[in-house]
Every structure is written in structure tokens, then in C-alpha cells.
């Protein structure tokens, strides 16, 4: 089975087949306007990719039909994921930008409905793909530092708005003594809590939703846990249904007249995410009185996990960020998010353009798309790391590919974090601030 093939290799072979000079076996021709230092570095390299999925000299093992089907299924899901997320990023981003312009009451109502529908589509897509990866055993939890209190505050603010829009009360009980930075998979952590809160709001028609996060009261203090409790006053779950609600595609009610819509993946995804993060989940419920879901996860301070204390880098002036993105709509949206939060941003629409920009200015952080024509994000990151001053500059993947395979490849090729499109403004700014603080 062949490994992942960078897009620029296909382009190069097509060029060679048409009579052009080989770009694969010999150094590529370089634009004359490139700085001498960068041109020398690129000319010294052969355009073979810096990673190898298998040893090229090793014999190729014949794939079984089942393996071939599994491979094709995976490639289909990756392509489908990318092709849906990319336009969805544009829809969500442009509705956010439009919401900041003067609108009539009628226009704002229509815009909010559009945004709500797009959010529903995004949530369904994310839950389905995440569940497919978890069920296949392809997912791996990351261990990176993140600001847990800031993440929890952001999620609480988002879901308080949704709760009150339904006429419910919302209460946050957050232990402010939690470590500033903990080690874990922030993306999966957020998704787990989002699923729990969404489920509570969905099945509660009156009363309140209470969101509690604290250190667990364990007797063994050397193994602290983070305890997340989501309690509601909703419809509740019958005792005989408690185990079934964690099964995939299970619903409390069925048929065409069911009151609560959805795929039935919410709680099954919660259970799988909890397992992936090394935790456990419990539920207490009574019909007509509500439900309480308790998740306990390992609580590991980031300095303990990484072996070094977290430090802050205090910069003078606005941080300057390089966005490497070939999609013009995505460029517009991300640049607006950054500039609205007091960052300066420059855009590069290809890997080669990113190298040219980075060779003339040292950026504080780079946001890197992965799938680009000519030179993909992995190759561009590899070459950026070899430029003077870029050995430790944070490079964050910003891509529509959300599979665990891409998570792992990002880590292997020098990227510190992985942001999946469509990225929410709060998530983007929080992650950027986090990596600027410890760079």
C-alpha cells in the first residue's frame, strides 16, 4: 500500500511527462526573485518529501481485498471531510462577518437562522467523522499544554447563550484553583464537554443546566482527576434505557413522530471520547426529574507532563502572524479574526510564497494549511524549520482534514497544534495566544 502522496509530486510528474525538466529527480528551478539564502537552501534539496510512510527500498507487501477496501474508505472520508468543511468554513465565517455589519431586524433574523442551520450541519459532520475514527480505533489522544480555565470559560459563555435562548437557566461552578496549564487533547476535551452540554440543553424544556468542573475528591492525592459534571432538569432516562443511550444510533424514542431529532450519536461519542482521554463516565437519572453525567479525566499539570515549567514571552507591539492558505475566502475570514483581536497578519497563498515571506521577516507564529497546490503544508513546514530563526517559531496546522493520521503527521513534521476548519473565533484566538505565550 503506497503512503500519502504530496500533491506537488503529481504536478511534477505531469510536467515531466509533457517534456519539462524533471522536478522529482533533479533540483527544481527557482524563481529569480527569491532571496539568495532561500534559493540556495531549496536548490540544495531534492524535491523528495521529507517524510517516508514506508522504506522505499523495502519490498511492497500485497494488500488484501479487505485492506484495500479499508484504505479506499479512509481516502473517501478524508476527501469528503475536506470538500464539505472547506465551503462550510466560508459559510460560517461570512455569516460572522455579516453579523458585524448594520442589518435590519428582519435581515438579522434571517442571518441567525442561516448560522443556526450551518452550525447544525457542522456539528453533525464533526460528530459523524469523529465517531467513525473512534470506532475504527484510528484515533489517538494528543498530549499538549492548554489553558483549561480559559477553555472552560469560553465553552460556558457559548452554551450559556444557547441555554438562555431556550428559556433555561445556566449555572457555571468552576474551580478556579485548577492549574493554569494542563496536558491533554484540547480538541477532544472541548468536543466531549460540548456534546454533554448540547445533550443537556436538547432534552431540557424547563428549569436549568448546571455545569460543574472541579478537582475530584480522591483519597489518593497523587492521582488527581478533573471531574466534569453536567446536570439538567430535563426529561430524564428510564433505568432500563441508561445503558442503551450510550449505544450508537440509539434514541429514547423512535418513529417519524419523535420529538427529538438527531443521529443518536451524542452520548456514544461522549463515551468513546472519555475512553480515549483515559477517563470514566457515570450517569444518574430519573424520568421527569433530569439527568446528571459525571466524567472523570486524568488531571496532569503541563509543566509536570513536559518536564519544564511554562513560561511567558512578553513581546513589544502586536504579534505578526503568517497565514499560509490558498483559499481566498478562508484568508479573508481568518485575517479578520486575527486583526479584530489586535494581531497583524500577512497571507501567503502557497508553500513557496510562505518561504519567500518568512525569509524576509521573522514572524511570531505561522498558521499553515495542509492541502495546497504545488507544495503542501508538510513540505512547507519542513523547509520553514530550516530557515534561520524558525527553529522554534510556533507553526499551527489550520486545515479541513481532521483525521488522526493528519494529527500524527503534523506532530512528526514540526507543527505544535492542529486546528480543524471551520475554526471558531474563540478557539483560534485562544490557541494563538497560548502558543505565543510559551514560544
Image (cartoon, grey):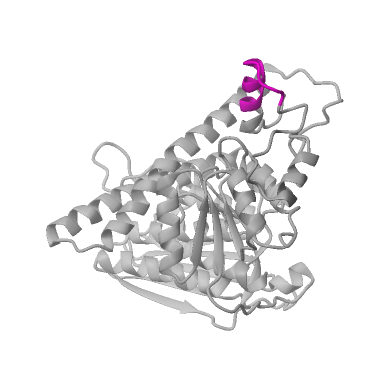
**Looking at the rendering, which quadrant does residue 2 occupy?**
top right
Location of residue 189 with respect to 173 vertically, above or below: above
Q: Horizontally, is 364 left or right of 388 in the view?
A: left
| Residue found at x 63% / y 61% | 361
Q: Is residue 225 visible?
A: yes
Q: Position of residue 67 (x, y in %)?
A: 67, 23
Where's the N terminus, which quadrant?
top right
Q: Quick check: is 17 in the magenta stretch?
A: yes
Q: Horizontally, is 275 left or right of 52 in the view?
A: left
Q: In terms of secondary structure, what is the magenta stretch mainly? A: helix
Tell me where the magenta segment starts and ends, as one range: 10-22
Nearer to the camera, 293 or 172: 172
Q: Residue furthest bottom?
A: 177
Q: Horizontally, is 307 left or right of 145 in the view?
A: right
Q: Quick check: is 21 in the magenta stretch?
A: yes
Location of residue 264 with respect to 106 vertically, above or below: above
Q: Position of residue 220 (x, y in %)?
A: 73, 76
Nearer to the camera, 240 or 295: 295
| Residue found at x 39% / y 41% | 87
Location of residue 351 with respect to 168 vertically, above or below: above
Q: Position of residue 254 (x, y in %)?
A: 32, 40
Q: How many marks?
A: 0
Q: Is residue 119 visible?
A: no
Q: Position of residue 15 (x, y in %)?
A: 63, 22
Amino acid at each position: 500500500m503506497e503512503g500519502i502522496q504530496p500533491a506537488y509530486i503529481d504536478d511534477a510528474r505531469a510536467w515531466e511527462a509533457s517534456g519539462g525538466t524533471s522536478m522529482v529527480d533533479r533540483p527544481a528551478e527557482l524563481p529569480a526573485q527569491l532571496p539568495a539564502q532561500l534559493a540556495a537552501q531549496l536548490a540544495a534539496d531534492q524535491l523528495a518529501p521529507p517524510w517516508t510512510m514506508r522504506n522505499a527500498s523495502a519490498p511492497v507487501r500485497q494488500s488484501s481485498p479487505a485492506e484495500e477496501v479499508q484504505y479506499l474508505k479512509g481516502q473517501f472520508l478524508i476527501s469528503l471531510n475536506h470538500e464539505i468543511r472547506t465551503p462550510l468554513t466560508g459559510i460560517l465565517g461570512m455569516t460572522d462577518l455579516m453579523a458585524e455589519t448594520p442589518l435590519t431586524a428582519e435581515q438579522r433574523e434571517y442571518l441567525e437562522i442561516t448560522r443556526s442551520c450551518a452550525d447544525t450541519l457542522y456539528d453533525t459532520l464533526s460528530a459523524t467523522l469523529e465517531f467513525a475514527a473512534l470506532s475504527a480505533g484510528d484515533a489517538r489522544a494528543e498530549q499538549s499544554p492548554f489553558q483549561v480555565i480559559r477553555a472552560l470559560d469560553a465553552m460556558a459563555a457559548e452554551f450559556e447563550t444557547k441555554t438562555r435562548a431556550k428559556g433555561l437557566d445556566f449555572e457555571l461552578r468552576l474551580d478556579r484553583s485548577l492549574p493554569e496549564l494542563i496536558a491533554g487533547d484540547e480538541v477532544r476535551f472541548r468536543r466531549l464537554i460540548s456534546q454533554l452540554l448540547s445533550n443537556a440543553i436538547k432534552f431540557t424544556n424547563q428549569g436549568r443546566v448546571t455545569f460543574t468542573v472541579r478537582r475530584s475528591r480522591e483519597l489518593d492525592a497523587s492521582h488527581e482527576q478533573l471531574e466534569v459534571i453536567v446536570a439538567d432538569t430535563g426529561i430524564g432516562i428510564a433505568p432500563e434505557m441508561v445503558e442503551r443511550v450510550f449505544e450508537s444510533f440509539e434514541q429514547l424514542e423512535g418513529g417519524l413522530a419523535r420529538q427529538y431529532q438527531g443521529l443518536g450519536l451524542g452520548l456514544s461519542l461522549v463515551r468513546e471520547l472519555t475512553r480515549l482521554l483515559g477517563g470514566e463516565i457515570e450517569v444518574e437519572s430519573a424520568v421527569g426529574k433530569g439527568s446528571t453525567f459525571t466524567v472523570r479525566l486524568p488531571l496532569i499539570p503541563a509543566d509536570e507532563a513536559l518536564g519544564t515549567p511554562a513560561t511567558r514571552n512578553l513581546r513589544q507591539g502586536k504579534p505578526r502572524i503568517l497565514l499560509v492558505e490558498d483559499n481566498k475566502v478562508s484568508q479573508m475570514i481568518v485575517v479578520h479574526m486575527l486583526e479584530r483581536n489586535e494581531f497583524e497578519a500577512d497571507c501567503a497563498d502557497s508553500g513557496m510564497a510562505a518561504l519567500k515571506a518568512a525569509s524576509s521577516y521573522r514572524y511570531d507564529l505561522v498558521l499553515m494549511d495542509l492541502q495546497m497546490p504545488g507544495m503542501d503544508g508538510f513540505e512547507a513546514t519542513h523547509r520553514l524549520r530550516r530557515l534561520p530563526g524558525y527553529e522554534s517559531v510556533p507553526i499551527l496546522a489550520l486545515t479541513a482534514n481532521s483525521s488522526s493520521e493528519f494529527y500524527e503527521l503534523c506532530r512528526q513534521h514540526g507543527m505544535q497544534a492542529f486546528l480543524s476548519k471551520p475554526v471558531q473565533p474563540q478557539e483560534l484566538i485562544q490557541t494563538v495566544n497560548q502558543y505565543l505565550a510559551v514560544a
